[in-house]
Amino acid sequence: MIGLIVTGHGHFASGLTEALNVIAGPAEHYAAVDFEVSDSVETLSANLQKAMDDMSDCESIIVLSDLAGGSPFKTAVELGYARGVEVVAGTNLGMLVEINMVRQFMEDVHQLAEQALTVGKDQVQKFVFQAPVEEENDDFSDGI
């Protein structure tokens, strides 16, 4: 199975994880790594390293982070590069739910990362109100 780590600023990772658990139940081979205000980058690095080490029995690992270029993203890239870990930024709940489910059936972590990008983009939408369509009521009693 592909291991899954979620990381981000504040309680981003634990918050998304709580929502994921409500929707899909607890996940296996999964870790949430928060980067709290009181944490140093060294603490974040140690926590991400531990999460990756704990998934040594996984075929591969994907990390979903909040912001491209932020400390959680950069640290995951630095730690995961030599291991072939895929790191994706811009994570949203829809992306997390789908990637968590499909990773059980996929073997290619690179393909999974591409799917995360597509799903994440597709999940960003806005509501567009459309007025109901009025039907024309042609009363043709003879069926013509």
Image: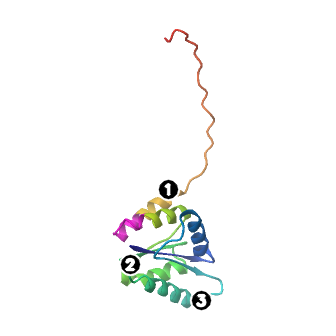
Question: Contact, CB < 8 Å: mark 2 with mark 1?
Answer: no
- Please tell me whether mark 2 sits on a helix, a strand or a loop: loop
| Magenta segment | 102-114
Question: Disc 3 residue type?
Answer: Ser
Side of 133 relative to 27 (left or right): right
Q: Are marks 2 and 3 in contact (CB under 8 Å)?
A: no
Work out whether mark 2 precedes mark 3 in sequence or the reverse, and give the earlier one: 3
Q: Amino acid at mark 1?
A: Asp
Residue 52 inside the magenta-drawn segment? no
**Residue 142 higher or lower than 104, as above or below:** above
Residue hosting label 3? 40
Q: At which x and y percent is residue 38?
A: 65, 87
Give how far apart the Cα atoms at labels 1 and 3 are: 34 Å
Q: Position of residue 35 (x, y in %)?
A: 59, 81
Marks 2, 3: nearer the viewer: 2
Residue at label 2?
Answer: 58
Q: Is residue 80 visible?
A: yes
- Viewer-nearest residue: 59 or 66: 59
Query: Which residue is located at x 37 percent, y 76 percent?
Result: 60
Decide: few, some or many residues near mark 3? Use Cα within 10 Å; few <14, some 14-19, many ≥20.
Answer: few
Q: Left or right? Give the position of 38 relative to 1.
A: right
Please name the residue shown 37% across and 71% down the image: 109
Quadrant assignment, res 105: bottom left
- The numbered mark, 1 or 3, whose residue comes first in the sequence reads 3
Give amino acid for label 2. Answer: Cys
Q: At x 50% / y 12%, what residue is drawn?
A: 143
Residue closest to the far right: 38
Q: Nearer the viewer, residue 68 or 51?
A: 51
Tell me the tag on residue 122. 1
